[in-house]
Image (tube, rainbow, N blue to C red):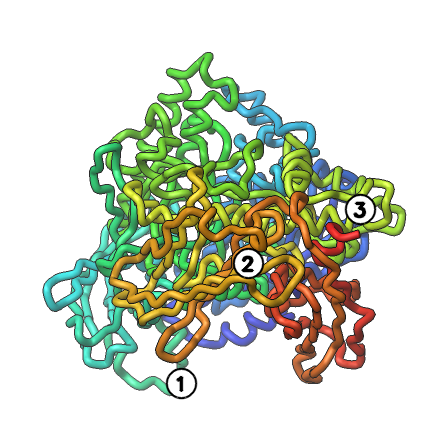
Amino acid sequence: MTRNRMQNFSSYCLLNILISVVISGAIEISLFDGWTVTNGNQSIQIHNEQIPSGIYTALEHANITDSVLNSYNDVNLRWIAKDKWKYSVNFGVTEELLNHSQILLVFHGIDTIANITINSQELLPNPNNMFVRYRYNVRDKLITSNNYLEIQFQSPIDAAKQYAAENTFTPPECPPNVYHGECHMNQLRKMQASFSWDWGLAAPSMGIWKPVVLEVYDTAIIRDVTFSLHSLEDQWQVDLSIYLESGVGSQTPRSVEGYLFIDLMDVPETPIIEKHVLISKTTDDSFKETITFSVPKHLVELWWPNGFGNQTLYRLNVTWLGENRDIYTNEIKQIPIEYLRSKKVVRVGFRTVELLEDKTDTGNLFYFKVNDVPIFMKGTNMIPTDILPENMFDNEKIEYLILSAKEAHMNSIRVWGGGVYESDYFYDLADEHGILIWQDMMFACAMYPVYPSFLKSVELEIVQNVRRLQHHPSILLWAGNNENEAALIQNWYGTRREQPRFIQEYVQLYRDVIEKAVVENDQWHIWLYSSPSNGNQSQQVINENPQDNNHGDVHFYNYILDAWTPNIFPKARFISEYGFQSVPSMHSLEQTMYSTDSIGDLIGHRQHFPFGSIPITTAINRNFKLPKKTDSNYWDAYIYFSQINQAMSTKIETETYRVGRFFEWKTMGALYWQLNDVWTAPSWSSIEHNGNFKLLQYWAKEFFAPTHVVAHIDPLDKLNVFIIKDTIGRAPTLNLFLRIYNWSSLKPVLQRSFVISMPEKFVERVIHENLNDFLNDAITKENSFMNFELRDKTNGELLSTNFLLLDKFKNSKQITNPQLQYNITNEHCNSKTNLHSATIEISVSAPTIFTYIKIKILQIETYKLSKNGFIQLTSKDLVTISFYNRNCAMAFTNDDIQILTVNDFLTT
């Protein structure tokens, strides 16, 4: 994906455009161009850097270093994070600008420990939290001709060590050695994963990762608008909280007076609300006004999650004027109206969400209702879109990930707590595409300090981010952290020796600070203390067993048992994390390697899981026969088998959870770990760092299908076939076809069909028979497999396909060489967009097992197939392929691809 860059206008140009206007409203001037970056001893200087920026990307753009993502640069470039770096810029203002009463320098995101001066005058407080917006009143510090702004960054590695030395020990101290990471991540309010993780590199950047602006106004500006709904009989009651800012600290006035105008723009039948207000300052230097109004339900459509209805959004325009109310209605031709007011437009959706925890004989259910409809949450977990925060505003990449989730029929993404609160664009797209966001707060896998300045910074972080994101209908809930309750109770970091202390500190942080800040700023969304947790029904901050299958959500990983066996998975209410590792494609790995690198050594270096690749190899050996390590095709086979195992294991586990809705434990959520990657390495992701799909992402579109057929063999050797329906209302009459194939023939040896009138249930068991009843001399577990096809009986539309293996591949018989041939046809390239597509026609004489299409052209960074890793049961099949940013002059031929099948490794 290409990195989006801001337009190249200097702050001088912006000022020249705006300063000639007489203003009683607000101006925002972006200081994004012309920055100089210097290291501690001034041996490195980079000029004309643009914001957002971080030191790793600045050095790469200046051709001083290569990418930290290549080869062993995660370690080789660590010197960058250990040095001190300075960002500086010169800018001018005019006398007209200085006439305004409020001129604030605003940093929307600084990463992380910094000292700021302007014209040699220090600005306080010093930034120490990358998730916080910092504002400084600089009206009395500016001059007209040449202002000098300087930000001096401290090494985050050194800062973390310093904080750890100055404060009471808070574990964990360091990550496992295999991470190649840095210590004391929990001492900084910085993206926790930047110090390394089991799926990611350490790249502790420094820089200005969000915009820097001058905000100029006379009365106040609107910072945030929060939005809460109450469903009445025939109306929606809307509660708006409007947060204004005016000055900062001691320069903040005690009150502001003016007019607020509320306009639900896309519902013309609703009137514009006008209110004259005199608002007193709150404790956090903001001014809060709450306005309540009603909207008749017949005037608006409901907002629904993906797969359940439309994602209807409405623009809500909130405008603030000073005391001159006439400006809003009078036509002033000389002065553009946008310069005369502060305006904020947010998009809102009309919907309800409830967390239900009905009591059962064994505990409590845990499920969500949206608009009174129980929703099975199908989705994934998302780590940061990039290891470098300044690169997280690549809208093309964000859209690609959201649409990939939507196309796989997902309706939920959990934003994991070791990353960042994502960009506004991310949540906008989630709104547009019906992806419910389980939003962790940014605390993960650690205990955290509770000294006063740390808690004060955390409180500000939560307040600012909740207010920023609260209005999005896609926000499902806030969770206090990732796995910290489980870590504390299960003694992951040796906390048992001081457990009373750590319990008290945990409660202090998550209940007294974070929950309090959430609840005070959002009465619309659900709050959970942690993930996993026992839910809210327990009414406990800390529970004896946060991983109790009978309460709340659980995280489940098991690398010992055979994950191709459904009965190993928990009978849990909601599984918010589960998954399996695989190795990224050879195509992606080679793009990050130097010519001197060994593929095996590089995979080993980037395998951060403390158990290494043993779980992958063990799982492969259960089902396949790997070539010898000395064989030329070893790594091709290893990568291929690892992706099959990941896809197969996740498919079976997900389908087990979806079927669990049928039984008394009523499973109602399955979010696999994880959607994306921050580099090219062994991980749990379904999409590689460059955007290429692993087999898991292709398969997810099948096992998350809205109407799906699932077949399992239970411990009593009974065949169980289920129909799953996520859609609302009665399903159409269905035709289910069960076919049994020998591995050596494309002709089924047994066929049965069923007509199914699906009631309004969401899961129905349609076959429950002894497997032996299907077996005979011609059909054995070793030589056969089952295939299922589900169609709409009325129009014949294919709704779902699935397969069921009866034995391990390495035990199978009659697997034969399918004589696979392929040919590239229908090649097309759009010269304007460089979107290049082609069709791959595949011919076979016998079933091909998990047909895997590899691209060999390294110049192609990202491509997508219509399917991959499939069982081919017809003599000819077609697969389309789309390339991104491929030169149309480059031909695409048979030599550019390679096709692997399991048959290749199981036939002689």
Identify the residue shown where x is 77% and y is 67%: 897
Closest to the observer, 373 or 570: 570
**Residue at the location (39% across, 51% down)?**
658
Looking at the rendering, in which quadrant would you find the N terminus? bottom right
Q: Amino acid at mark 3?
A: Tyr
Label 1: which residue? 334
Q: Is 247 placed above or below 193 here?
A: below
Q: Position of residue 89 (x, y in %)?
A: 65, 56
Badge nearest the viewer, 2 or 1: 2
Tell me if label 2 and label 3 are in contact, CB under 8 Å. no
Q: Earlier in the sequence, mark 2 or mark 3?
A: 3
In the picture as drawn, the residue positioned furthest to the front comes out as 777
Q: Nearer the viewer, mark 1 or mark 3?
A: 3
Residue 874 drawn at (x, y percent): 62, 71
First reached walking from the N terminus: tag 2 or tag 1: 1
Q: Tell me if 210 is positioned left or right of 475 in this view.
A: right
Q: Is residue 143 visible?
A: no
Instruction: Give the spatial CA distance, label 2 vs label 1.
Output: 59 Å
Q: Which residue in the structure is indicated by mark 2? A: 699
Q: Which mark is residue 555?
A: none
Q: Report helix, strand or loop for mark 1.
A: loop
Residue sitting at the far left:
233
Residue 559 in which image quadrant: top right
Of callouts 1 and 3, the N-terminal one = 1
Secondary element under disc 2, as helix, strand or loop, is helix
Residue 837, horizontal then vertical, whole percent: 67, 77
Residue under label 3, please give it: 634
- Horizontal side of 830 relative to 360 (left or right) equals right
